[in-house]
Amino acid sequence: MTPQPGKRDRSRQTGLARVLSKLGYCSRSQASEFIRAGRVKLNGVVRRDPETPTRLTEDKITVDERPVKTSPKRYFMLHKPRGVVTTAADERGRETVYEYLPKTLSWIAPVGRLDKASEGLLLLTNDSEWAARISAPETHLDKTYHVQIRAVAGEALLQALRAGVAAKDGDFLAAKRADVLRQGQRNSWLEIVLDEGKNRQIRRMLEHLNIEVLRLVRVAIGPLVLGQLAKGQSRELSPDEQASLTRAMPGPGN
C-alpha cells in the first residue's frame, strides 16, 4: 500500500539510536546515551527517546549541532595481547584494545569479545549489521583457537570436548572439532574449533573437565587467519578478506 501524502511510511523507519549505529557514527548504546542527554536533534528537534522513529536516508540528524553523515565502512583486525580488555573504557583503569588502534581512526567497535586472559584475532568495525551477523550463534561461523592446557591430552579428553558438556548454569557446550597440535610431558596444545560463540565457552568446557587453561589464542575466524600479524598490531582488512568473511556467513550480502 502506498502511504498517503503527508504521512510517514513507518515500515521504512528505525529507532533513532539504531540509525546512528547503522550510519557508523557510534555504537547503539552510545547513541542512546547521547539521545537521552539531549545532544541529538532529528530534523532540528531534540529527541530524548532512543526509539524515536527515524528514516535512515531522509531525516536529518545532528549530534552537538553537527550533521551526521554515513561513514565509510571500515573493517580491521587486531592481534589482541593477553591482559587487555575488549572495551572502549574501563572503570578500573585497565589497558583496552583501543590503545592498540590508530589514534586517527574514527569510531569502530569490537566484533564480539576476547576476555582479558585470552589473546589473538579480534575484528573491529563500524558496520554494526555485519558485526551482528559475525557474532550471531545462528551464523555458525567457525572460530579456531589454539589452547595450551596443563595436562597431557588423550583421546578421551578430545572426545569429551566434541561430545559436549553441561556447564554449571545448565548451558550445553561442545566443540565442533578438537585435536592435539603438540604436547610435552605435562602440557598440551590443542586446536579447538567452535561454531556457536557462547561466552567463555572453551574455558567453561575445560573447567568442567578439571583442566587448567594456560593460554588461549584465537587464530582464525572463518577463512580469515591471524597469520604473521604481530601481537598488539592492527591492520585494515582487504576488500577480498572482508568479502570472504561475508561469503562464509549465510543470509543477505553473500
Image (spheres, helix red, strand yellow):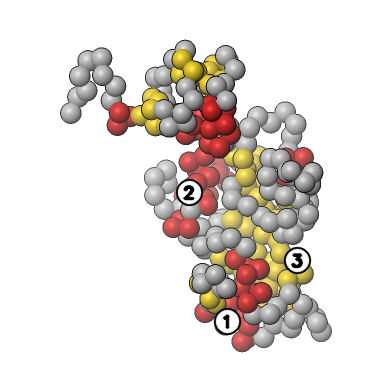
* Circle 2 residue: 133
Q: Nearer the viewer, residue 251 or 30?
A: 30
> Between marks 2 and 3, how big is the CA–CA gap?
27 Å
* Circle 1 residue: 160
Q: Residue at x 22, y 23 (%)?
A: 3
Residue type pointed to by label 1: Ala
The image quarter containing residue 83 is bottom right
* Circle 3 residue: 215
Q: Horizontal and vertical percent for residue 15?
A: 42, 32
> How many marks overall?
3
> Between marks 1 and 3, how big is the CA–CA gap?
20 Å
Residue sitting at the far left: 1
**Contact? badges 1 and 3 (CB < 8 Å):** no
Nearest to N terminus: mark 1 or mark 3: 1
Residue 215 seen in the figure? yes
Residue type pointed to by label 2: Arg
Q: Residue at x 57, y 82 (%)?
A: 159
Q: Secondary structure at mark 3?
A: strand
Q: Is residue 201 above or below residue 24?
A: below
